[in-house]
Image (spheres, grey):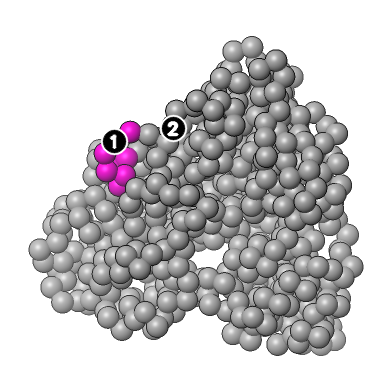
Amino acid sequence: MTTLQSVPALGTHPASGSLPSRAETREQLSKATYDLLVIGGGILGISTAWHAAQSGLRVALVDAGDFAGATSSASSKLLHGGLRYLQTGAVKLVAENHFERRAVSRQVAPHLANPLTFYLPVYKGGPHGAAKLGAGVFAYSALSAFGDGVGHLLSPAKAAQDVPELRTDNLKAVAVYGDDQMNDARMALMTVRAAVDAGATVLNHAEVTGLRFTRGRVTGAELKDRTSGDEFGVTARLVLNATGPWVDHLRKMEDPNAAPSIRLSKGAHLVLKRTSPWKAALATPIDKYRITFALPWEDMLLLGTTDEEYEGDPGQVEVTEKDTAQILDEAAFSIRDQQLSRDLITYAFAGLRVLPGGPGDTSKAKRETVVTEGRGGMLSVAGGKWTTFRHIGRTVMKKLEQLPGHPLGEDYESVSTLPKRLPLPGIANPNAVAHRLLVDGPAPGPRMAADTAKHLATHYGSLSFDIARMANENPELAERVHPDAPEIWAQVAYARDHEWAETADDVLRRRTTLTIRGLATDEVRAGVESMLRK
């Protein structure tokens, strides 16, 4: 493992094509007049900024924390049609979700998403019978044009071969269907990169301290750089509030009397070390509406999620003992006890779903996108789900295009004329990238390890070659960040120079998953902090 003594010297000379400095970005933001200022760097704001920049608009995107620093990196990591929506008869919604899921995982970002087989166990006395679930997964696969195979029933014995920790007592049958999973933080980051490639100006860790008004209209924002303390402002023709759980906080900056527009639902997850290989995920019905997931992800097991109303400070959301107990108890319906030992938990995280305001159980509320216009003309958008992030960006842009008076002007491309499946940066076949990384190693010195090559290929796609080049030029950057992990120090330097990483958590929690996998030791964290200061 790289010693702390050597880390400060690593990557001190940023590679060509590095990002502008924060000071340069602040100056650019404060001097220009933007068509659209997007406040909020979750996937909803990011996707809107991407589509707006593609349209030819001058776009700025800011966030008080890191890109995807809150709920957008606290999801179940799924791109899915939403099997449970069939229960409510939302057939059209499932079909639309499948279309977006397949577009993202096959054409937009095949390097960041991968297919995953799901087993839905049917137990004696469970909320659904085998015949009903068999018909359900068949209909589900039909709505995706059988692109992931035909949903069917499987014997308990065959399912237990693929998932050795599956509880087989009273197991009558297993329904099978296909969906996709992803690394949500990296998907969001590559979408930020796509927005910048299209012309957007972005800055994370930049907090809005107030709004700018011109004759009663919101025409920008006052900001504070949380990393330096510098204060600056951004002027824009239109401001979009895409701050997720904080959407009403910003609406009150516009109008102190603004009524609440949303409610929040907390979804908690646990991450555990695996006791055996998992070749499929489990989706276990808890009741008529809820499913609990057990997902093989990043060489770990991801369990969850909960769904309960949350009324506290969005910045203070955390996984409680009650959440942990609920997740483990629900997982125990279908998973053997040895896999559910608390000693195996490496991380826990919680995100907040933004739901339309109103009464009723949050688990039954629609995951729809809500757009409202405030008294000062600021647009606020909230809600939606990860699977349809591109569709949401297009939908918001269409609403902006249709605003009375055309505040964005008319001299730009309509979102309806944009390419429907523009790929994210790094698009490539990850298997081919991994092969190239192994074959094209440096002439002198050791070749890249196979696990590192696979890791880079499935997290960066063709951008892996830039990281490999850095490692080839500086052997210290080719060393592992942690001896039990495939990540190398070149990824930390790359996160700093090309991916807007400012803090250790930016690197360890979102640019990589070392924190989630329980590998962000004090030594690793100190090494990362040292490199970020260079």
Q: Residue 221 is drawn in which quadrant?
A: top right
Q: Main secondary structure of the magenta part?
A: loop
For the residues bearing labels 1 and 2, Cβ distance under 8 angstroms:
no
Classed neighbour count for the residue bearing mark 1: other residues with Cα under 10 Å, few (<14), some (14–19), many (≥20): few
Residue 423: image location, x then y, percent:
64, 47
Three-letter code for the amino acid on which mark 1 is drawn? Pro
Residue placed furthest toward the left: 125
- Callout 1: SS: loop
Relative to 354, say whether 478 is above or below. Answer: below
316 falls in the magenta region: no
Residue 256: image location, x then y, percent:
54, 28
Classed neighbour count for the residue bearing mark 2: other residues with Cα under 10 Å, few (<14), some (14–19), many (≥20): few
Residue beneath label 1, please? 359
User: Which residues are drawn in magenta?
Assistant: 358-365
Residue 441: image location, x then y, percent:
77, 79
Observer-nearest of 490 and 380: 380
359 falls in the magenta region: yes
Quarter that holds the C terminus = bottom right
Residue beneath label 2, please? 260
Which residue is drawn at the image coordinates 72% and 19% (left, top)? 214
Q: CA distance from mark 1 to mark 2?
A: 13 Å
Quarter that holds the N terminus = bottom right
Residue placed furthest toward the top: 405
